[in-house]
Image: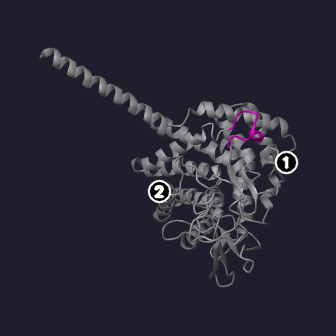
Amino acid sequence: MQLKKTLYRTIVLFVLITFSFAFVFIENTDNKAKPIKEVMEVAKQQYSQMLKHSSELKNYPRTTDKNGNTKYVSIDDWTGGFWPGNLWYLYEYTQDANFKKEALRWTESLESNQFNKSHHDLGFMMYCSYGNAYRITQNKKYKDILIQSAKSLISRFNPTVGSIKSWDYRASWDGKTVWYYPVIMDNLMNLELLFFATKETGDPIYRNVAIKHAEATLKNHVRKDYSSYHVVNYDSVTGKVLNRQTCQGYADNSTWARGQAWGIYGFTMIYRETQDVRFLEAAKGMANFYINHPNLPSDKIPYWDFNVNQKGFTPDWKYNPNLFSYIPRDVSSAAIVSSALFELSEQLGINGKEYKDFALSTINTLSSSAYLADTGTNGYFILKHSVGSFPHGNEIDVPLVYADYYFLEALLRNNQLTKISAP
């Protein structure tokens, strides 16, 4: 009898130990990202090679061409600031002096953009470059350039509309609508530059513009279910909403994945700067829509639009469903969301675990061979499989410099959160 009891206890103990190890394994594979050191080593090797092939300060790496070679853009392109921003993030993690030297060179090559008033992207162009430069070096020259950039950005604000004009003019896909005062969801991202300018100067004008724009976006871009419109077109005289449509999404009433990502990130950042719960609720609502969407793939890397080929969603552009045998994913959206959710989880404390777990799972997927490039490939970018604009036939299933930027930011934010929570 005693032997049976001992045997029974042994079996129970063995089962419990086995279950415990299995649970740890599941936790490590599903909820923990790969070690940041491994991923950053890939990034370091890729960008070291990129720097060898990208010596002209007027050519900014953006994506790859049809042959898989690095494709560059000029200083006027909205993505130019991400490249030096990526170098700053690599320097921040590695403390490699060469990355700092190159980050300085590429950042300073963008100096003339502080006077650019032609569109809304000054935040992307200048805050991702000079913002990181100033944060890391505290060079007063960089602060002054950022403040001038903010002045240029608010020159596009119309108080009647309550928003910063995104583009000067754009025709919609329906062939009959003209957007004279279009505002896009992406524009939320540029508001961080304005909050910075008020904090540094003490002048409330920048912050006030940012809040007005955020309020208008919340009112007019975000649907009741917390999905989002890409473009809202206003009457510049009355401020009335004329059209709610899309430019880069599948249909006017669909949810473009990166537009939703911009909203999650943007409202999270705006809540950080204002502590206004309206923006927190918007960030949570948009995040919940994204996380719980039935059309989100199990690996958490979204299709380029949540409603591709679904009933009730009709594109105005010439969509050919047979062009691809698959629906392309958009890694850039996943990277943006993962970075945003690390910050949102930090804002929420113990109530943010769901968002942090989702972000961890996402960057773990992005760190896998399915999405992380092999060194020497992918035009020397870090991540594969992003989509720029499917309706325009541009940058479909290619690397994108801003996907790398928000991925690196997500990795650094996770690394910082891990340090904070460590005993």
Q: Residues within 10 Å of mark 2 (few under 14, many from 20)?
A: few
Instruction: Kindly indicate whether the residue at mark 2 contacts the one at mark 1 (C-beta within 8 angstroms).
Output: no
For disc 2, the marked residue is 292
Q: Amino acid at mark 2?
A: Asn
Left or right of 281? Residue 139 is right
**Residue 230: horizontal and vertical position, in percent?**
63, 67
Q: Which residue corresponds to the image point at 21% horizontal and 22% vertical from the top-left? A: 8
Residue 95 position by quadrant? top right
Image height of 89 relative to 158, above or below: above
Taking the view exactly as shown, the residue that stands out farthest to the bottom is: 238
At mark 2, the secondary structure is loop
**Residue 336: horizontal and vertical position, in percent?**
60, 51
Residue 305 position by quadrant? bottom right
For disc 1, the marked residue is 59
**Residue 149: horizontal and vertical position, in percent?**
74, 59
Q: Which residues are magenta?
A: 373-383
Q: Amino acid at mark 1?
A: Asn
Nearest the camera: 342 or 163?
Answer: 342
Residue 312 position by quadrant? bottom right
Q: Answer whether residue 377 is magenta in the image.
A: yes
Q: Which residue corresponds to the image point at 63% horizontal and 61% vertical from the top-left? A: 191
SS majority, magenta: loop
